[in-house]
Image (cartoon, rainbow, N blue to C red):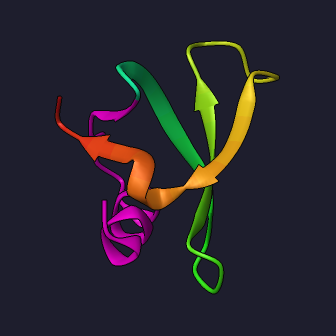
Amino acid sequence: MEIQRAVEIFNSKDTYKVNLEGKSVWIEHVDQQNGMATVQVGSRPTNTLTVNVDRLKEGE
């Protein structure tokens, strides 16, 4: 995923499917300068990862 698209999804009021290695995630924060995103994996708010946005896929 491109960094700008990650920012658009994060700022949108709509819900988009985003996956990280086949697992559904929610984007919680986007660090544009470093190309990183903090995502919540699954439904547990404490299960977060910070990953390169290139690893995120939309709509799969």
The image position of residue 30, as x and y in percent, is 59, 66
Quadrant in which the C terminus appears: top left
Task: Indicate whether 18 appears above or below 56.
Answer: above
Among all residues in the image, which is located at the extreme right? Answer: 46
Going 35% across and 58% down the picture, which residue do you hit? 9
In the image, is 14 to the left or to the right of 50? Answer: left
Q: Quadrant of residue 20?
A: top left
Quadrant in which the N terminus appears: bottom left
Residue 45 among magenta residues: no
Residue 12 among magenta residues: yes
The image position of residue 59, as x and y in percent, is 17, 36
The image position of residue 19, as x and y in percent, is 36, 31
In the image, is 60 to the left or to the right of 21? Answer: left
Q: Quadrant of residue 29?
A: bottom right
In this orientation, which residue lies closer to the viewer: 57 or 30?
A: 57
Going 73% across and 32% down the picture, which residue do you hit? 48
In the image, is 44 to the left or to the right of 36? Answer: right
In this orientation, which residue lies closer to the viewer: 57 or 14?
A: 57
Query: In the rendered structure, which segment of residues is drawn in magenta?
Result: 1-20
Q: Quadrant of residue 32?
A: bottom right
The image position of residue 7, as x and y in percent, is 43, 70
Going 56% across and 73% down the picture, which residue do you hit? 35
Among all residues in the image, which is located at the extreme bottom? Answer: 33
Among all residues in the image, which is located at the extreme top? Answer: 43
